[in-house]
Image: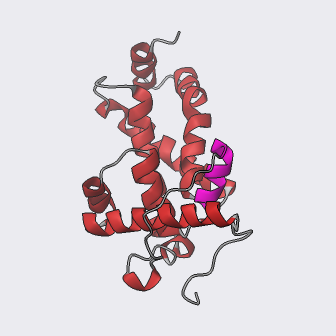
Amino acid sequence: MIDERKLVRECLKGKMQAQQQLYDLYSATMLGICYRYTRSMRDAEDVLQEGFVKVFSKLDQYKFEGELGAWIRRIMVTSSLNFLKRNKRYRDEMFFTEEYMHPVEKEDPAVKLQAKEIADLVRQLPQGYQVIFNLHAVEGFSHVEIGEILGISDSTSRSQYARARNLLISWIRNVSVPSKKVNYAGK
């Protein structure tokens, strides 16, 4: 088992071998996190690299409170969100107004899907829905935290999450999963 405290200390001393070991230890998992927020593996890889630059530049701020992986994960989520905000093609899809919202339903489908099938469905959501769904359902952020991160109200986060969830439910029920990116409101 790897002694993470020792590994972090070695990284802080600038030892390349330790930095490579830290990267190798977490890069595959963190790439999956970045990919959840982006539309391509290339973008996810860009976010991963940007995230690890931040990890190494801020490693002195890690206080050994909680798991190192959780600390790195938070940096990767933040890096992913910053990437989405900076990129016009993502930013333009992140609508948080009623005009672009799907109606909310209350029923749950009685369908069992594999994790990959669910992840594929989530990736088909409009970007704003996808981001909020991932932040709340996958990363465990509260709606208040999501509101602060995205600069929206917590009630907008709640409604976007409910709409994302219900859109997923309707796709599962109707087995009409979009084969390509869905076009909302004539966009």
Q: Residue at x 26, y 63 (%)?
A: 154
* Residue 168 figure quarter: bottom right
Q: Position of residue 179 (x, y in %)?
A: 74, 68
Q: Position of residue 131 (x, y in %)?
A: 47, 60
Left or right of 175, for residue 146: left
Any part of residue 139 in sight: yes
Q: Main secondary structure of the magenta part?
A: helix
Front residue of this view, candidates 105 and 52: 105
Q: Does 14 appear above or below 96?
A: above
Instruction: Give the residue at the far bottom of this rendering.
Output: 186
The range drawn in magenta is 113-123
Front residue of this view, candidates 130 and 109: 109
Quarter holding the C terminus is bottom right
Q: Position of residue 22 (x, y in %)?
A: 53, 26
Q: Does 25 appear above or below 187?
A: above
Residue 122 located within the stretch drawn in magenta: yes
Instruction: Give the residue at the far right of this rendering.
Output: 179
Q: Residue at x 60, y 51 (%)?
A: 35
Q: Residue at x 53, y 21 (%)?
A: 18
Q: Residue at x 68, y 53 (%)?
A: 41
